[in-house]
Structures are given as C-alpha cells and as structure tokens.
Image: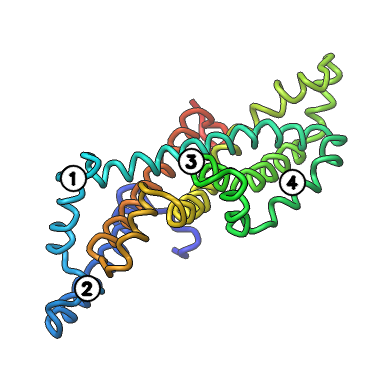
C-alpha cells in the first residue's frame, strides 16, 4: 500500500508522535552526560537532577520577598495576560471580521486599514506601546492584541466573504436583512473557523507575551527566563521553556476538542 493512502490508527498516532520526542530526550541526555564528563560544572546542558533541584525551589519554596511560589506566580501572571489578550483579539475577529466579510462597503472602508496594521511587525510597536501606555499590564496585553487580532480578522473576513453567494440570496429571498444574514447565515459558519484562527494565533501570542514580559515585567514566565539568563541558569530556562510548550499544546488540543464537540459538521462528522 502506498503511504499516501495509508491511514494511522489513534493508538499508533500517539506512539509515532512520541517517538521523535523520546529521541530528542535521549540525544539531550547523551550530550549532557558527555559534557558533564568532560566538565562537571557545565551549565549549558544541565542534567535532569540539576533541573529538578532548581525547579523544586521555585515550585515549593515561597519567595522570601513576596511569599509567593515563584513558578506558579509566573504561570498565573502569564496565563492571565495571554487569556485577556487572546479574548480581546477573538472578540475583535468575530465582530470586525464578520462585518468585513459580509458587508462590501465596510470591507472597502476598513479593509486597507486592517491590512496595513497586519503587516506591521508588532515587536516594532513595543517601544511605542510602553511610552503611550506605560509599563503596566495594558501595554503587554495591547501587544498581544495588536499582534494577533488583525491576522484573525483577515482570516474570518476571507472565510465569510467566500461563503456561497446562493446562501445570501436565499436568505434575502426569505426576507432577511443585512443584520440577519450576518447573524443567521454567516456567524454559524464562521465559528469553526474562529476556533481554528485561535489555534493558529496561539504561537504568535506566546511570542508577543514573552517579548513584553522580558522587557518590562516583574513576574511571568518570560520575565523569569530573561532574568536568569544572565547567570546561565539553563536548569531553570529549559524547564520553563518546556512548560510553555506544554501549556501551548494543552490549549491547542482543548480548542481542537471544543471545535469537534461544538461543530462536528465542520470536521466531516455527525452527531
């Protein structure tokens, strides 16, 4: 059987997906062991025991100044910023994207503006945001919104604009006005695409969050990574990066499951 026609069962997919991760872990352990054999004080590739020891202090020992568990405080702060930014961007995507896609006059008026904002590198706006909005939470959340909202808006607008014209005509034939066409025809079909757009935006959202936290913050996953880098504390940096990756994967899987549960028809499934 040709590989292009070969389907992989669920259990086999999990096994095959775990193989590259296991291979990378083995390669890391071999390289770390060889470096420590040559130099027991090596900091570039810490051994698992060193990472466990360093992370235990951050996980279970309260900070002497704040009394907080540092790791969990960093995680909570970053997830709050990410959640608010992603929520605002999602709301903008469905409202503005729906209007741009369904209403040609709105698309002609606001389309060039959205496109212009979308092509500006958001990191370039970071100094402007910090000057205009200060160094607080507003600037960090604004960077996430500016970074992902225009792309999400364009995606939803393109999806709505590509809906079969026959559906719009039939709805109008039945007496629907522009508002009803948007809500009753376009919106239900845009919702699965919205969840897909959120999945695609997760990666960039994390990038903008870490960038903002690294420059101006006193708590957060990105702040901690850039704080300890000056000491070459790879035994903290590597677990933090792995934790960010795990959080991103969990979010992606959650959005995928939610989409399949709420909109099975968009995935070729039935109730």
Q: Say the numbered circle drawn on residue 114.
A: 4
Mark-to-mark CA distance, 3 and 1: 24 Å
Q: Nearer the viewer, mark 3 or mark 4?
A: 3
73 horizontally vs 266: left or right:
left
**Mark earlier in primary sequence (4, 2):** 2
Q: For the point 14% across and 85% down, which residue is it?
A: 38
Given residues 125 and 131, the one toward you in this image is 131
230 horizontally vs 156: left or right:
left
**Mark earlier in primary sequence (3, 4):** 4
Q: Residues within 10 Å of mark 1 (few under 14, many from 20)?
A: few
Q: Secondary structure at mark 1?
A: loop
Q: Nearer the viewer, mark 4 or mark 2?
A: 2
Q: Secondary structure at mark 2?
A: loop
Pinpoint residue 35: horizontal percent, then vertical percent: 19, 81
Mark-to-mark CA distance, 3 and 4: 24 Å
Pinpoint residue 138: horizontal percent, then vertical percent: 53, 40
Q: Residues within 10 Å of mark 2 (few under 14, many from 20)?
A: some
Pinpoint residue 130: horizontal percent, then vertical percent: 56, 50
Disc 3 and disc 4 in contact, CB within 8 angstroms? no
């Amino acid at each position: 059987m040709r590989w292009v026609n070969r389907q992989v069962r669920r259990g086999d997919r999990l096994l095959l997906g775990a193989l590259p991760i296991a291979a990378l872990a083995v390669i890391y352990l071999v390289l770390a062991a060889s470096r420590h054999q040559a130099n027991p004080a090596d900091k570039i590739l810490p051994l698992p025991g060193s990472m466990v020891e360093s992370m235990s202090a951050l996980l279970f020992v309260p900070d002497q100044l704040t009394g907080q568990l540092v790791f969990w405080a960093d995680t909570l702060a970053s997830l709050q910023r990410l959640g608010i930014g992603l929520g605002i961007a999602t709301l903008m995507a469905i409202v503005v994207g729906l209007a741009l896609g369904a209403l040609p006059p709105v698309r002609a008026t606001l389309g060039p503006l959205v496109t212009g904002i979308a092509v500006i590198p958001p990191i370039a706006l970071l100094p402007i945001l910090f000057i205009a909005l200060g160094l607080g939470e507003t600037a960090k959340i604004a960077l996430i919104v500016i970074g992902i909202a225009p792309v999400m808006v364009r995606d939803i607008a393109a999806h709505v604009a590509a809906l079969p014209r026959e559906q719009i005509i039939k709805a109008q034939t039945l007496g629907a006005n522009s508002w009803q066409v948007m809500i009753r025809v376009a919106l239900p079909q845009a919702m699965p695409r919205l969840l897909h757009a959120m999945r695609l935006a997760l990666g960039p959202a994390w990038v903008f969050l870490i960038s903002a936290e690294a420059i101006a913050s006193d708590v957060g996953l990105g702040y901690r990574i850039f704080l300890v880098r000056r000491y070459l504390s790879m035994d903290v940096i590597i677990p933090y990066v792995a934790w960010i990756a795990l959080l991103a994967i969990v979010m992606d899987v959650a959005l995928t499951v939610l989409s399949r549960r709420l909109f099975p028809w968009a995935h070729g499934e039935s109730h």
